[in-house]
Image (cartoon, grey):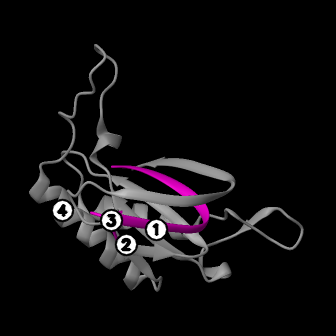
Amino acid sequence: MKSVIQRVTDASVSVDGERVGHIAKGLLVYLGIEKGDTEETLVWLCSKITKLRVFSDSEGKMNLSLKEVDGSLLVISQFTLCANLHKGNRPSYNEAADPEEASFLYEKALETFRELGFPVEKGIFGAHMHVTYTNDGPVTLALEA
């Protein structure tokens, strides 16, 4: 399981020209589900993301978590994070979970973030999406589980 996490001042996702998700201050999370990923791993990853101290405190140090800044999450399923780029020039997606399993775990991630007490917006699984955001910092982190 792979994720790319961006601290944002705002983020939105659109499908076919219609905005389907939007947050103000918070985290934009791209989530790649790989073959063999489990619900247990997913729950750990979601918990870890919400506890990351990546927001600035009054002294300008990254010391505050999502909860401490009343932030939200925009979670986008992104199988391209699972690409293998080592051979040739065309990405191989052999390690990406099949769509049925990936969709199940993506929905489980949304549910887990909500159970942890966070407002969550989302894209549409499998759709061609346009994601617009303002990366704050910029702060971009990669987390694998």
State the CA–CA distance, disc 1 to disc 3: 12 Å
According to the picture, the residue beneath numbered tag 2 turns out to be 19
- The residue labelled by disc 1 is 12
Along the polypeptide, which appears first: circle 4 or circle 1? Answer: 1
Quadrant of residue 104 in the image?
bottom left
User: Which tag is nearer the camera, tag 1 or tag 2?
Assistant: 2
Report helix, strand or loop for mark 2. strand
Decide if residue 136 is on the left or right side of residue 3.
right
- Report if the CB atoms under discs 4 and 1 are less than 8 Å apart: no
Q: Is residue 25 magenta?
A: no
Residue annotated with mark 3? 17
Q: Indicate the amino acid at tag 3.
A: Gly
Residue occupying the point 24% across, 46% down: 34
Label 4 or label 2, whichever lies nearer to me, is: 2
Q: Which mark is residue 103?
A: 4
The span from disc 4 to disc 1 (Cα, nearest Å) is 20 Å
Secondary structure at numbered mark 3: loop
